[in-house]
Image (cartoon, rainbow, N blue to C red):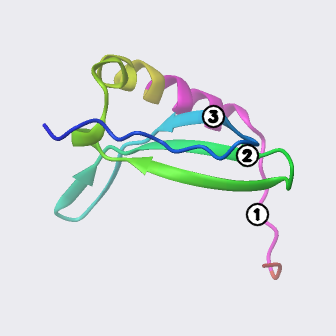
Amino acid sequence: MTKPLTIMLNPNEQIVAVTPEICSGPGWVNAPTWVHIVDYSTAKHRAECIQPDERTPALDVLFSAAEAMQGSLLAAVPTKTVKGKT
């Protein structure tokens, strides 16, 4: 295991969400943890990615339960794809 990743925050930034994700394709799988950060002085959003080998022990323990909750939350949000808009 590598050293846990430390997220660097600027003075006006705050972490607003941490979202674990299991993603895969033909021949690969990954389980990143996305850290969503907002700068309240500019309203800008950025996301940092923590790879599985960069997690803290606490993130490791919480990952599976949080990923299941995240999937349920995503499924609970009603959405509609609008064609022709980007």
Query: What is the distance, in whole Å, between disc 1 and disc 2 at their CAs?
Result: 26 Å
Depth-wise, is mark 3 or mark 2 nearer the camera? 2
> Does 1 lie within the magenta span?
no
The residue closer to the viewer here, 70 or 75, is 70
Task: Give the structural element (helix, strand or loop) at label 2.
Answer: strand
The residue closer to the viewer here, 41 or 19, is 41
Q: Residues within 10 Å of mark 3 (few under 14, many from 20)?
A: few
Where residue 47 appears, as percent x and y from the top left, is 57, 52
Q: Residue at x 31, y 46 (%)?
A: 51
Residue indicated by mark 2? 38
Residue indicated by mark 3? 17
Q: Is residue 21 left or right of residue 44?
A: left
Q: Residues within 10 Å of mark 2 (few under 14, many from 20)?
A: some
The numbered mark, 3 or 2, whose residue comes first in the sequence reads 3
Label at residue 81: 1
> In the rendered image of this protein, does residue 76 appear above or below residue 35?
above
The numbered mark, 3 or 1, whose residue comes first in the sequence reads 3
Q: Residue at x 27, y 40 (%)?
A: 54
Task: Give the structural element (helix, strand or loop) at label 3.
Answer: strand
The residue under label 3 is which amino acid type? Answer: Ala
Q: Residue at x 81, y 82 (%)?
A: 84
Q: Range of the magenta residues? A: 68-83
